[in-house]
Image (spheres, rainbow, N blue to C red):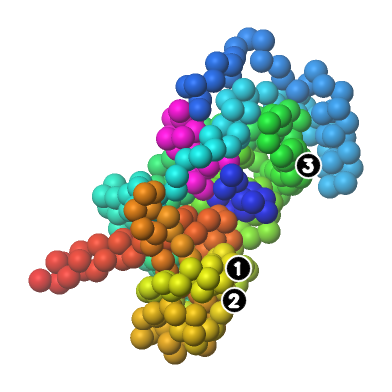
């Protein structure tokens, strides 16, 4: 999901997929079943037209953005409070052990690999063009779209206006209040609808308001979405060219370095103090290769000549020993899409698995 906030919903447990109710991550689905609240379709679920503060918000944003106040308020009048959105935005229960192997298995699996190969074949032209323009290779773009929505199969079924209004005006208690962020996103959503000629009541997305195959929040759409095929319209739901270009543009804007790998193999230092020192900056590349070596880390030969900074990335495996990689600036760039090292590694591994499948298909067809 392209940039929800500084914490980027990691604490929410979205796993960046931003899916609809029917395709929620396991933890969110369990929370949904465990909490007994009114149904989204209950007749007493309010529409926001009854709220004076919401109508004032609509008038103010219309004035700021040069929009028609009556149109904005008319749309907000029909926005509905969604009880399920208020449930799903809550963090997962504390104390759940992270498990990279289990997390990876959810995304690097046959359905996504097959769908990714088909997406790659159908859109090879646009993947190549995006790489030429932004330096982001096909496997990274394909990995992100696969992790986010399985190439458009699961883009979310919440009306975006309902999800954003719920979180803007009725953000649930029990966690840090993010309502100002969602009010900004609701404003950006009206700007997006105006620029693209959309009815604000029609777009659908995740329970957090993310949209399309790449699950862009409205602000990310307005900043980073591109019309790659030049048809005069940006469509992140049904136009794979625009999806590919927008994901690549987003990563380029967040520091992707053309031609640089995402990570290197590494054995973490045995000494706890040295290991802690390298882990201190988390996923931010902060140490040169020689600093890794001096701290007792054993890097792959390819990493020893790397001129940029590296981060020691730890991926916990429940009760088993953690996994480690040495992340580059490009690994860090992928985490700007979703601020999680587990997410980044799932994207990278899925993309590489799809690339291998595409290569096998090419080899078979060449026989």
Q: How many numbered markers are drawn? A: 3
> Which residue in the structure is indicated by mark 2?
286
Magenta region: 12-30
Q: Is residue 67 magenta?
A: no
Pick out the residue farthest to the top: 43
Tell which circle, 2 or 3, labels the residue nearer the N-terminal end.
3
Pick the quarter of the image with the C terminus.
Answer: bottom left
The answer to whether the residues at label 2 and label 1 have Cβ atoms under 8 Å apart is yes
Of residues 262 and 159, the one nearer the viewer is: 262
Tell which circle, 1 or 3, labels the residue nearer the N-terminal end.
3
Q: Position of residue 228 (x, y in %)?
A: 54, 64
Tell which circle, 2 or 1, labels the residue nearer the N-terminal end.
1
Q: Which residue does the image show at 36% across and 86% down from the upper left?
A: 301
Q: Position of residue 327 (x, y in %)?
A: 48, 71
Q: Look at the picture and state if 298 lies above or below 347.
A: below
> Which residue in the structure is indicated by mark 1?
281
């Amino acid at each position: 999901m392209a940039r929800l906030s500084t914490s980027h919903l990691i604490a929410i447990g979205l796993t960046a997929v931003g899916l609809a109710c029917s395709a929620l991550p396991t933890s969110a689905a369990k929370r949904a079943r465990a909490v007994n609240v009114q149904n989204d379709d209950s007749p007493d679920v309010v529409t926001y037209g009854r709220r004076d503060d919401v109508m004032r918000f609509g008038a103010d944003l219309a004035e700021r953005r040069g929009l028609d106040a009556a149109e904005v308020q008319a749309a907000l009048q029909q926005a509905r409070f969604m009880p399920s959105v208020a449930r799903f935005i809550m963090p997962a229960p504390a104390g759940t052990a992270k498990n990279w192997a289990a997390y990876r298995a959810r995304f690097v699996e046959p359905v996504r690999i097959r769908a990714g190969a088909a997406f790659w074949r159908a859109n090879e032209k646009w993947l190549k063009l995006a790489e030429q323009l932004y330096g982001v290779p096909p496997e990274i773009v394909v990995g992100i779209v696969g992790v986010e929505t399985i190439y458009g199969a699961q883009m979310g079924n919440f009306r975006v206006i309902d999800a954003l209004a719920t979180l803007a005006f009725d953000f649930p208690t029990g966690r840090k209040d993010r309502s100002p962020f969602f009010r900004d996103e609701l404003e950006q959503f009206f700007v997006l609808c105006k620029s693209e000629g959309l009815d604000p009541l029609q777009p659908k997305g995740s329970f957090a308001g993310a949209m399309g195959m790449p699950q862009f929040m409205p602000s990310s759409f307005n900043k980073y979405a591109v019309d790659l095929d030049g048809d005069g319209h940006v469509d992140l739901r049904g136009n794979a060219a625009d999806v590919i270009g927008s994901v690549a543009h987003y990563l380029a804007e967040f520091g992707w370095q053309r031609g640089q790998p995402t990570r290197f193999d590494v054995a973490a230092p045995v000494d706890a103090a040295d290991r802690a020192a390298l882990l201190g900056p988390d996923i931010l590349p902060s140490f040169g290769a020689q600093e890794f070596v001096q701290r007792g880390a054993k890097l792959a030969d390819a990493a020893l000549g790397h001129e940029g900074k590296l981060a020691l990335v730890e991926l916990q495996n429940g009760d088993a020993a953690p996994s480690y990689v040495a992340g580059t600036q490009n690994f860090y760039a992928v985490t700007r899409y979703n601020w999680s090292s587990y997410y980044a590694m799932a994207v990278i591994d899925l993309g590489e698995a799809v690339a291998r499948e595409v290569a096998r298909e090419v080899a078979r067809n060449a026989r």
